[in-house]
Image (cartoon, helix red, strand yellow):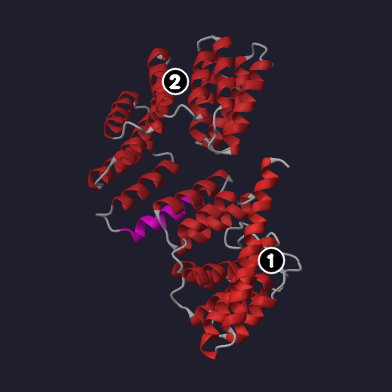
Amino acid sequence: MNTVGGIKQVAAARTEHLRLGMLFLLAVLVLVPEHRPAVSMLHVNLGVIQLLKSGYVSIVGDPSTSCPSADTFDASDFRQALSWNGQNERALIYSGVVQWMNGDCSGALKNWREAANVAPVSNLTWLYLGKGEFVSGETSPAVTAFRNAEAEALLMRLGDRAASVQSRLEWYELAVRTEPTVLSVGKYAELLDYVGRKPEAVEVWEVFASQMAEDDPDHWWALAVTAGLRGHWAQAAELYHRGGALAGYPYSFLEREGVALQRAGDLDGAITTFRQAVQLYPEGVWTYWYAGHLERCRGRYAEAERWYQAAADIQPRHPLAHLYLGALALDRGQYDLAANHFATARTKQPDTYDEKRLCWFLERAMGVYDGDRVAWYISLGERFQEIGRVDEAILTYQHALELEPDNSEALAHLDALR
């Protein structure tokens, strides 16, 4: 027997022993009427064990936005639990879970609403109810339920894991409606912008800014992002600076101010700001990457290498550190070194599947590189665009134009991104 099979067998045996122990305890408790609540909970635990043995995966952790088709999960233990104690919140929740998994979504909602009446302070109950109402098209009640569950972070994770862009948009919008924060608004607006809905992205940030007091750093962050979306980068840099002056820990404001200064053309100011940011937070790898990109843009390759290498030293397992070192080597005509960096990037642990896919593309591109650097940069920029890395896309298109200033394809891409 292999190791994995042995572990599964041991786990199954322990689960069965636990079930048998509960059955024995249940046989003892049913003889005493005062133990009805305890008997009810034992039936719930038995039902949960059966669910797990049947392959149940948590509904609230599933990013699907549709009610499942009918299945054959057994609800008998939960019905028994409710017969002993009709106010058992967990029995109501899991009765709803089984109904949901069996395709009876309206029945599930009825049980979860009853559970919310029984235990109005239970986050778990509100999570199930919110998921059920949202998938059933009852968005406003879902917002209330998720707000009661303080579930904004969960909603963003569901959006991150969703299979389609539309589902991601729906989860992020729900997170914003539940509890608007810089993080939730940022994820939602960034995706809106990515799918070509920039006016809506601007509006989301404007509404958020209007809800914040002027002495709140988030107010200035939102205004700065709005200015950036409109292409007013000098104004964005000034707004980030004002927000940073109010923030107790202004690292993020300094980093974004540096990016805005770079986009506004103040490259010396941007580098100065990046240096201030890394002095405040030496582990901020993104700041090193932004500074490296800037120095690459103006042909200061030795400086760029120092920034990129510093990032690689801080997070040696991150593929982008080697990705950028490879791109820099390519700029310098060091094609063998570039190929080595791209190959190294593939061996590192990527943050996302998209980064892994990009590293694969880069290594493959080096294998078929035919000397047409303009076409290579345009192709690379398109890959960056596909995964939402706008800054890197702009940089690569700019490299293409440095080599061929009138290249219509690179110009069209840049116009679309600005």
Residue at position x 37%, y 34% in the image: 284
Could one spot residue 211 in this view of the protein?
A: yes
Residue 333 falls in image quadrant = top right
Q: State yes or no: residue 129 in magenta.
A: no
Could one spot residue 235 in this view of the protein?
A: no
Residue 293 falls in image quadrant = top left
Q: Nearer the viewer, residue 70 or 177?
A: 70
Q: Which residue is mark 1?
A: 67
Residue 382 falls in image quadrant = top right
Overall secondary structure of the magenta stretch? helix
Residue at position x 43%, y 61% in the image: 179
**Residue at mark 1 to residue at mark 2: CA–CA distance:** 50 Å
Q: Position of residue 93 (x, y in %)?
A: 58, 74
Q: Nearer the viewer, residue 55 or 277?
A: 55
Q: Position of residue 222 (x, y in %)?
A: 37, 50
Q: Which residues are magenta?
A: 201-212
- Name the amino acid type tagged 2: Cys
Label 1 packing within 10 angstroms: few (<14), some (14-19), many (20+): some
Q: Which of pointers 1 and 2 lies earlier in the amino acid sequence?
A: 1
Disc sitting over residue 297 in the figure? 2
Label 2 packing within 10 angstroms: few (<14), some (14-19), many (20+): some
